Image (cartoon, rainbow, N blue to C red):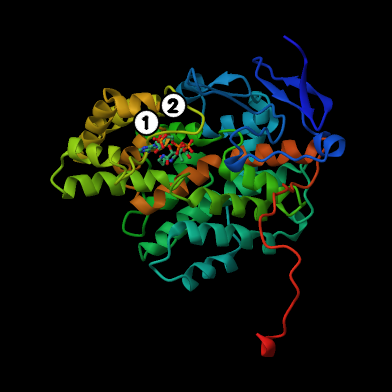
Amino acid sequence: MTDKATLGYDRETYEMPIVEGSYGERAVDIRSLRKDTGLITLDSGFMNTGATKSAITYINGEEGILLYRGYPIEQLAEASTFVETSYLLIYGELPTPAQIKEFSTLLTYHSMLHEDMRHFFDGFPSSAHPMAVLSSMVSALAAYYPDSIEPDTHNEHHIARVLSKVRTVAAFSFQKRQGRPVAYPRNELKYCANFLHMMFSHPAEPTYNPDPELVKALNVLLILHADHEQNCSTSTVRLVGSSRANLYAAISAGISALWGPLHGGANQAVIDMLQEIRDEGGDPKAFMEQVKNRERRLMGFGHRVYKNFDPRATILKKYADHLLQYLHIEDELFDIARELEQVALSDDYFIERKLYPNVDFYSGVLYRAMGIPTDMFTVLFTLGRIPGWIAHWKEMMEAPDLKIGRPRQIYEGPTSRDYVPIDQR
Ligand code: ACO
């Protein structure tokens, strides 16, 4: 195969190098296109645009492969913890026992919020969506840690602080909405257990200790969400970070991007959809006919990259089965979800369009089983995605060719008009 692509334009020929990735994926390097030809490329939704080279996550959408730093997601979900996977994503290697101890200590050290920040939660209406609270609070963290404003990718305190404090903000916002006092972190608990403690402890049950099965399920959920290369929110974090804005600002922007129902907000939309189907009489087949007639959208199905199956959904379905059995929960929404999947997998409409369950299809069922309310689902997704965002921010900031992100456009508006003062119009 040739290592150059040729473009013929305006009676000239231009050659552009081909760049090859670790698994042989190939791209045309157009970095000098505009300089050489005056042309730009137009690619709405960035369906064909590689924004960067990256060594963090590999996805093969056709074969349903997802690797973090080369390790298969199935192995990490089975045997790793969220903290270890976070270290792997951010620093590139699995930690040694000494490194994980140091990293965990840093996370513990940075788990508290400045006490003044606690009062911020009182200022939000009780009806506020927790994602609005989370993005605002994360942005506000920069006000309390001015030493983080100048980006420093080598300062492990800055990195641990973000990872640890977002968890505390998420749990505090939940407690405040429940009308309960916040539960401060406990140093003896590990990351996921500590989060469950901060979410569910209250004064009437001061000895609450998270069930190890729930802790394991949360570890798996967060690992599965920890990174997914150049998706909408990660690209947002990179774009904001490329201006050298501080890490909190970049992460806060990522949270806003993740909130949308076509992205991380889909897990909440899935449960809303399953509830609607149940309330309308629980007929998945009738619902699917409406989807095919384009009257409804099957939330939790389809993916820009996975066109065969989403390996995260396969793992989550197994865990949902296991956890519901363990907790003796019979969830009719899970039954409807299973039926929808069955219908979709045998229907030409979905087969032809390569529509399969994505990570959001079963995660909501798991969150429900864990006692997490629907509008907190995307907050949980956020918590999982923080290490991925940090890893991409760090990789980008350390790249020798870092440039501020700045796409171009094709202008279609009016041309050369003369201004007419208002009294003459
Ligand atoms: N339900 C019904 N039809 C669908 C769905 C769906 N969930 N997803 C795609 N299609 C159809 C489209 O109508 C289109 O059909 P057509 O070719 O006849 O017009 C075809 O499949 C291709 O769909 P696109 O929208 O072009 O696919 P795209 O890659 O742009 O969108 C997306 C991917 C946004 C995820 C889409 O599948 C979707 O909206 N899914 C539901 C929302 C969801 O679950 N989002 C979470 C994604 S995972 C994540 O972000 C963590």
Q: Secondary structure at mark 1?
A: loop
Q: Quadrant of ligand 1?
A: top left
Tell whether circle 2 marks a residue whose Cβ is less than 8 angstroms from ligand 1.
yes
Q: Are marks 1 and 2 in contact (CB under 8 Å)?
A: yes
Position of 98 compared to 175: left or right? right
- In this figure, what is the number of numbered marks? 2
The image position of residue 26, as x and y in percent, is 68, 20
In the picture, the quarter occupied by the C terminus is: bottom right
**Residue 386 in view of the camera:** no
Q: Provide the residue designation for mark 2.
A: 310
Question: What crowding class fits label 1: few (fewer than 14 Cα within 10 Å), some (14-19), or many (20 or more)?
Answer: many
The image position of residue 43, as x and y in percent, is 63, 39
Going by the numbered disc 1, the residue's amino acid type is Pro
Q: Please, which residue is most extreme toward the bottom here?
A: 423
Alpha carbon distance from label 1 to label 2: 7 Å
Q: Provide the residue designation for mark 1.
A: 357
Q: Residue at x 76, y 42 (%)?
A: 153
Position of 293 compared to 257: left or right? left
Q: Nearer the viewer, residue 224 or 409?
A: 409
Q: Please, which residue is most extreme toward the top here?
A: 1
Image vertical order of residue 244 relative to residue 15, above or below: below
